[in-house]
């Protein structure tokens, strides 16, 4: 009988087991459900890191396995955040407005409530009317559906136009970057309907959970992020296994030959591009409620370039490599940019790590490229192979003679 997928891929079970152990450990050490050894802010950092690991998996699928260097996947990440952020901000504002208007002698009409909500949300950009794109902001189910549909439809349309024209290589990367820049510039406008440069704020306040403290809510989001990462890793591992994965890797290595063999290369690319955009949108929908705010700067092209650097450091073409790269860079970045690392006075100049972190990241990327071209994941592979070689028993003379005869 054929073995199940997990038995044929034990590394997936190892990853899920380690992720579960990490989540349980963080919960026990948290302030919300444990002994309080790690702060609520750090629990949020861990949850956000898991979301970044999820989008890194999406980037590894589209770049490491399919060979499409997308410099726009953070746009899908941001769109997912905006979709869920609209519901969070609308419902939170609605509860405040209803409470304020409830103190009046006459109960407010639905029109008065809606006008007050519009003034509260859009007064900062000089407006008071709720834009049409917010028509479903009061429905959690629809907004969750939009988390999937909006990034997915954008990727589907963009990918169909790009792949049918057979745009490849650096030209495709430039196109994805242009898409991201255009979206970012549009969202910076006050009349975009999403509060322009101000973005959406107060997302950490969950409607219906006003009586719960942030230390509890942060653990909830940690659990949700861990579940999404585990499910995303399992789905990605299944996706790149079997015939589909072989064809996708073939497209990465020699697209012309795969097309010559009769495969619809454009269709495979479009599936991978669209699916990874949906994964990125889900990751963003979980990330920004933990961050508390989202603005157009989050969708700037530089963010997608950072994402590619994370995957390259971790080792593209290895799902766990993408996770290692994203987790390492995220946690180290938090450490350096939070002011926890003391500055180094040199007399004539003071090294402030908040400003020098990007230099360190670039230097680390160069070192990995020169001395570990397969990334940190490649080093893990080499370590596992060495341990297996040491643990394996030496071949017997009979087996050696049998292998020699087979080679002959």
Image (tube, rainbow, N blue to C red):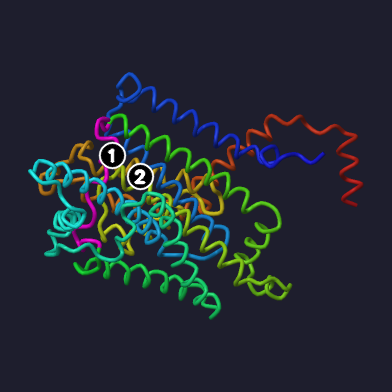
Residue 306, quarter of the rendered image: bottom left
Report the predominant secondary structure element of the magenta stretch.
loop
Depicted 312 relative to depicted 228: above or below = below
Please state which of residues 146 and 248 is positioned toward the viewer in this rendering. Answer: 146
118 and 199: which is toward the camera = 118
Q: Position of residue 163 (x, y in %)?
A: 54, 75
Pick the front one: 277 or 46: 277
- Secondary structure beneath dot 1 equals helix
Q: Please indicate whether residue 240 sits to the left or right of residue 33 in the image.
A: right
Say whether residue 11 is left or right of residue 111.
right
Label 2 sits on a secondary structure element that is: helix
Residue at mark 2 = 330
In percent of the image, x 18 and y 54: which residue is there? 117
**Tag on residue 335?**
1
Residue 263 x, y percent position in the rendering = 69, 71
Give the number of marks. 2
Q: Quadrant of the N terminus?
A: top right
* Residue 203 colored in magenta in the image: yes
Quadrant of residue 212 within the rendered picture: top left
Q: Is residue 126 left or right of residue 165?
A: left
Residue 77: x, y in percent?
39, 56
| Residue nearest the observer in this picture, 45 or 169 | 45
Q: Which residues are magenta?
A: 194-214
Dot 1 or dot 2, earlier in sequence: 2
Residue 270 drawn above or below residue 32: below
Residue at 49% from the left image edge and 34% from the top image edge: 19
Where residue 399 appears, as percent x and y from the top left, is 87, 36
Per the model, the C-alpha gap separating discs 1 and 2 is 9 Å
Report if residue 390 lies within the magenta region: no
Residue 15 falls in which quadrant of the image? top right
């Amino acid at each position: 009988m054929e073995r199940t997928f997990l038995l044929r891929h034990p590394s997936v079970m190892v990853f899920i087991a380690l992720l579960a152990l990490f989540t349980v450990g963080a919960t026990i050490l948290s302030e919300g459900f444990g002994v309080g050894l790690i702060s609520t802010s750090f629990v949020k950092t861990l949850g956000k890191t898991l979301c970044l690991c999820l989008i890194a998996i999406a980037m590894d699928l589209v770049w490491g396995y399919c060979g499409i260097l997308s410099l726009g996947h953070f746009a899908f990440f941001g769109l997912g955040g905006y979709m869920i952020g609209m519901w969070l901000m609308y419902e939170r504002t609605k509860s405040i407005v209803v409470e304020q208007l409830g103190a009046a002698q006459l109960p407010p009409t639905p029109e008065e409530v809606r006008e007050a909500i519009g003034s509260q949300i859009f007064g900062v950009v000089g407006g008071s009317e709720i834009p049409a794109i917010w028509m479903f902001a009061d429905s959690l189910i629809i907004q969750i559906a939009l988390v999937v549909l909006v990034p997915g439809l954008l990727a589907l349309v963009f990918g169909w136009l790009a792949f049918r024209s057979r745009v490849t290589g650096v030209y495709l990367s430039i196109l994805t970057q242009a898409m991201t820049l255009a979206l970012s510039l549009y969202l910076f406008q006050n009349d975009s309907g999403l509060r322009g440069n101000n973005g959406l704020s107060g997302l950490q306040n969950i409607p219906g959970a006003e009586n719960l403290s942030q230390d509890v809510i942060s653990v909830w989001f940690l659990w949700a992020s861990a579940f999404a990462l585990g499910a995303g890793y399992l789905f990605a591992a299944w996706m790149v296994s079997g015939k589909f994965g072989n064809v996708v890797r073939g497209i990465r290595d020699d697209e012309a030959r795969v097309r010559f063999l009769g495969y619809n290369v454009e269709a495979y690319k479009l599936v991978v591009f669209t699916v990874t955009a949906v994964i990125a949108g889900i990751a963003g929908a979980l990330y920004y409620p933990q961050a508390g705010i989202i603005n157009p700067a989050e969708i700037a092209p530089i963010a997608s370039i950072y994402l590619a650097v994370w995957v390259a450091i971790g080792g593209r073409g290895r799902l766990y490599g993408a996770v290692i790269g994203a987790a390492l860079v995220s946690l180290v970045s938090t450490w350096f940019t939070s002011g926890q690392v003391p500055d180094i006075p040199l007399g004539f100049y003071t090294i402030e790590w908040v400003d020098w972190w990007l230099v360190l990241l670039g230097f680390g990327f160069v070192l990995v490229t020169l001395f570990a071209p397969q990334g940190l994941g490649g080093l893990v592979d080499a370590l596992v192979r060495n341990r297996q070689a040491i643990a394996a028993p030496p071949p017997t003379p009979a087996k050696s003679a049998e292998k020699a005869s087979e080679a002959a």
